[in-house]
Amino acid sequence: MLKYKNIIIIGTSHIAKSSLKEIESVFFKQDPEIVAVELDKSRLHALLENKKPDYSLALIPQIGLQGYLFAVIGAFLQKKLGNIVGITPGSDMLKAVTLARDNQKRIALIDRDIRITLSRLSKAIKWKEKINFLIDIFRAPFSEKMKIDLKKVPEKEIITKALGLLKKRYPGIYAALVDERNKIMALKINALMENYPDKKILVVVGAGHEEDLLDLVKKGLSQKKAI
């Protein structure tokens, strides 16, 4: 958990029971007026209605073949991992939203539209990254010396190492999935902080976004002060 001015940021795992407990504990201890979550409208609707993501082939012209394949494979892997630990992927975000709704708190959606992210991903992946992917299937560099307990949020050291490998071997994927989204979420958080300076804001994001997101929020506020 990170704190800065009127925001509290929790970094979660989308399939860890410990994240659900942390969100509930922090929510009631901090009693925020606003809960900001790493969701867009379509993903929020899917979570609330308990609907599976719509990955029909008709999406390919809109988000690109590579973005489509990434979404389908990613959803499959998350579901498999979720089945292992008995948690539905996205339960952390649903927990935060449910707590906010049940306690009459304002909900803020701070992530980019998933269709835009997948479209950007399709355009960002280069041939070198495709080759790296084939190599990594056999080498499995992301699993080397990384022992992860799926029931808990990974340690910061593991997250940092994994993000470093992703950025080095898959710069296009890193840009579309991490860097660009961090910048967008930071802008939205800055806007919330400026519009509601006296309100406590709880921000719930994946643990891979937590550190950089806070740095961007701080930079954004300092740059505006300098103008």
Image: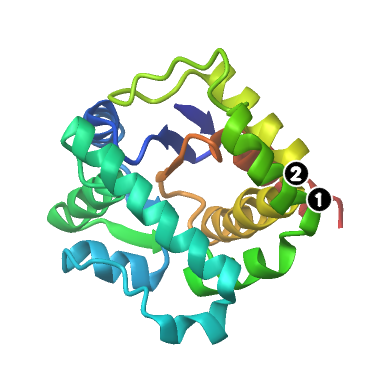
Relative to 48, residue 10 above or below: above
Question: Which structural element holds mark 1?
Answer: helix
Can residue 163 be seen in the rendering of this structure? yes
State the residue lying farthest toward the left. Answer: 102
Q: Nearer the viewer, residue 6 or 153?
A: 153
Q: Is residue 3 left or right of residue 80?
A: right
Residue 103 on image: x %, y %: 16, 52
Q: Quadrant of the C terminus?
A: bottom right
Q: Which residue is mark 1?
A: 223
Contact flag, marks 1 and 2 (Cβ < 8 Å): yes
Is 97 situated left or right of 162 in this image? left
Residue type at mark 2: give it.
Lys
Which residue corresponds to the image point at 68% horizontal and 38% vertical from the top-left? 135
**Residue identified by numbered label 2:** 219
Q: x and y percent of residue 96 in the render?
A: 27, 47
Instruction: Determine the image quadrant of residue 172.
Output: bottom right
